[in-house]
Structures are given as C-alpha cells and as structure tokens.
Amino acid sequence: MYETPEPGKIEIRDIDYYVKRCPDVFDTMLPGYVFCYDDIKDKLPEGMSFVADGLRGIPSPYRAPWFDREEIKRRGNKRDFICNVCGTPLGASDTPFDHAVLADIKSKHIRRPDLKGELIYELDDDRVVDDSMVFCPGRGAKRLRWWGELPFGRPDQRHNYIIAADPSYGLGSANSAAIIVDVNMREQVGSWTDANTPPAEFADQLVALAYWIGGIAPCYLIWESTGGCGSMFGQRVTWQQYVNVYTQRREDSKTRKKTNKYGWNATGNTKDALLGELGIALSGGLSDVREYKALVIHDAALHEELCDYIFREKGKGAVASKKADISTGALERHGDRVIAAGLCVLAYKEQLPGDVANAVVRPFGSFAYYEEQKRLKKAKDKREMRRELF
C-alpha cells in the first residue's frame, strides 16, 4: 500500500513489499517518507507504477497496485468504482459520469464547430430523393453543426458513420437531437438539434442526412423508439425505406438475439447500462490509442448535458436537469444529446470501421458516384416491386 497526500507526492506504507520488488530504489526509504514520484519514475522496473493524483474524489486513504488496476478498468464509471471497489455507498446518488473525466474532455476536445448550416433535400411522393442533398453552411437556423473537413462537399467516404437520434414531439418543450460519429476515428463529427421539428420531419431530415454522409457501408441509423414520438419517427423511417437501421437485440443475453422491432427501447435498466457504457467510452476517448469502446466529443452543449446528469434516490435511475436550452429554445433539457451519444456507442457493435486501404472513393458528382447511384436505385426499385407483389 501507499498514500498520495497531494498530487505528485508518494508516501510508502508497505515498504517491505517494494524493497523486495525493487531494492535499488526503496532500500534507503523509511515508512512515512514522502517523496516526489517524478524523482523515481524512470528507475522503476517494468510493470511497476504509482498514481500520484492526491486521491482526488476517491474515499480511500490508501492506494495499491490492485486498486490502481481496478480504477483503470472501471474508469468512466466512477459510481461503480466507488461502490464496488472502495466499498462505500458514497457515490450511489452521484452522477453516472466522472466529473474529473468531463473536466479533461472540456479542456482537451470541446471546441466550436467548423461549419454550421442546413442540409437541403428534395421529396418525391413524400420520399427523400437519394442524390438531392446539398449542405449549405451559414444558411437557415443552422441546425446541422459539423466538426472537420468535407472533401468534395461530403464527409470522407472511406470511413463509416453512425447517426443516433432521440426524437421529441417537436412542440418546443424538448429537443429532437442527433449525434453523428465517425466510426473509424471514434469521434463526433456532427450534431443536429431542434425543439420544433415534428417526428416525421425529423425522420426525413436524418434519412437525407444518412444519404448525404454515405461511407463505405451506408450510414447506420439508430434511435430511441420509446413513446409516441419514437414510434412515429420509426414508422416514417420505415416509409422512407432506409434499411441500414438498428433492430432491437437482447443486449443482456449472450447471443444478443435479434428481434423484429426497430429502434432502441429505453427502460430503467437499459438506460443505466447505456449511460455506463457511454461513461467508459468518454474516458477511452481521452487515450491516445482509440480502442473499440472510445468516443471523442466536441459539442459544448452535449458536454453541458453530461455534467447535468444525476442519479435519483432509491434506485430510480438517472435523469438530466430541467434547465432550458438557450441554443434551441427548448423549455427543458431531457438529456436528449446524451442518449444519442450513448446510442452511438451501442451501435459500434453493428457498424464496423471502414476499410480505408481497399476503399473505392466516389466523389460526389463524379461519374463513379452516379454509376453507384444507378445501381442503388435499381436495387431499391426491385425491393419496391417485391413489396407490391407480396
């Protein structure tokens, strides 16, 4: 065991253990001696390290190698770590997200979008026309915000993307929110938010957005299907015949058995699990090595909603604050952006990164692009004919 009385300082308690492991460094040290970690960091053998953080926010007087490994393993879900490793219920009514991690995210990743504007598209018999989308920066209500470059006027077509949505009724009381993630980079590249867009129109907008984003595999669409607005949104997506969408699975089973229902259904248990996975992914996004479960966010409004999430008492699940959203005019925030971000992490299981090395790039408006659109239209017409016949 050892203590870290303040950041950068170490005090060894179990000196015999460390003398046995590394006598060259610890032979001359006595119990209770406080030293600077940086002074010995380069002298330690491989596999030995200390965490000199001053135990910020952790209700434990000591650290130990096992304790440090468990903290790394559960990083991003501080509630789980405090309850099950430290053995105290101190964090039981706390936030599902580690505020130390959120502070690091704010300083490292949160920034203004590179582009803000509207995606313009056409409808033919109430269906989105596949090649009619044009992104117009600086136009309209600027509901679409984008971080990064747009080669040939579209996202990098060598990558794969996810759009995750949390619909509302569009009556001004809550936001309809969507988060767009680049699966190859494990990074947020876009967001779309509005409080006055009905579910059907929101579905049209996201289907058009999915066609515009594209990717090696078609952009993957996932949404929360709970409630009337989620049902209306899903019915409209089905009417639009966009097929690369999330089909409900038994996420709590070994086989993840697929059902015949579209969209993600929110219950108390599934929501808490989703937020826990999101917390781990946010923590993973701070690492230089982007692992499978990692998510880098750039949206300041999303970050603010993450900071406002708390657990209610008596095991009633997590809720967001009910502050008004000045950016969209919504009367209350219901954590819509947070749920959308969590759904992006869930959809990692379904949408794999694009194979950049073997990708065939079809710039928007090129001959290859129009040839691909002809092939897709022929396949779509075939599906419609089969639908009418059977």
Image: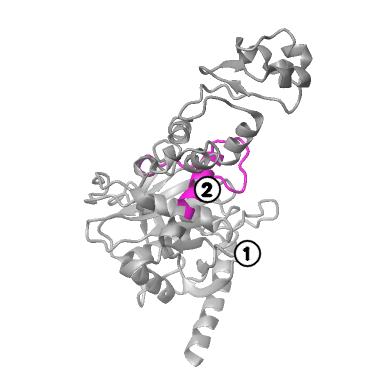
Which quadrant of the figure contains the N terminus?
Answer: top right
Name the mark on residue 254: 1
- Please give the residue where the numbered disc 2 appears in the rendered image: 151
Task: Give x and y (percent) for residue 102.
Answer: 44, 36
Q: In the visual, does 327 lie left or right of 8?
A: left
Query: Foreground residue, 170 or 103?
Result: 103
Count of numbered tags: 2
Extreme residue toward the bottom, this view: 389
Residue type at mark 2?
Pro
Nearer to me, 311 or 107: 311
Instruction: Determine whether 200 is above or below 134 in the image.
Output: below
Residue 313 rendering spot, x and y as whole percentages:
34, 48
Labelled disc at residue 136? none
Start-end of magenta stretch: 273-302
Judged from the image, the secondary structure of the residue bearing numbered disc 2 is helix
Q: Residue at x 59, y 58 (%)?
A: 349
Residue occupying the point 48% across, 35% down: 101
Quadrant for residue 348, please give it. bottom right
Q: Residues within 10 Å of mark 1 (few under 14, many from 20)?
A: few
Q: 41 above or below 212?
A: above
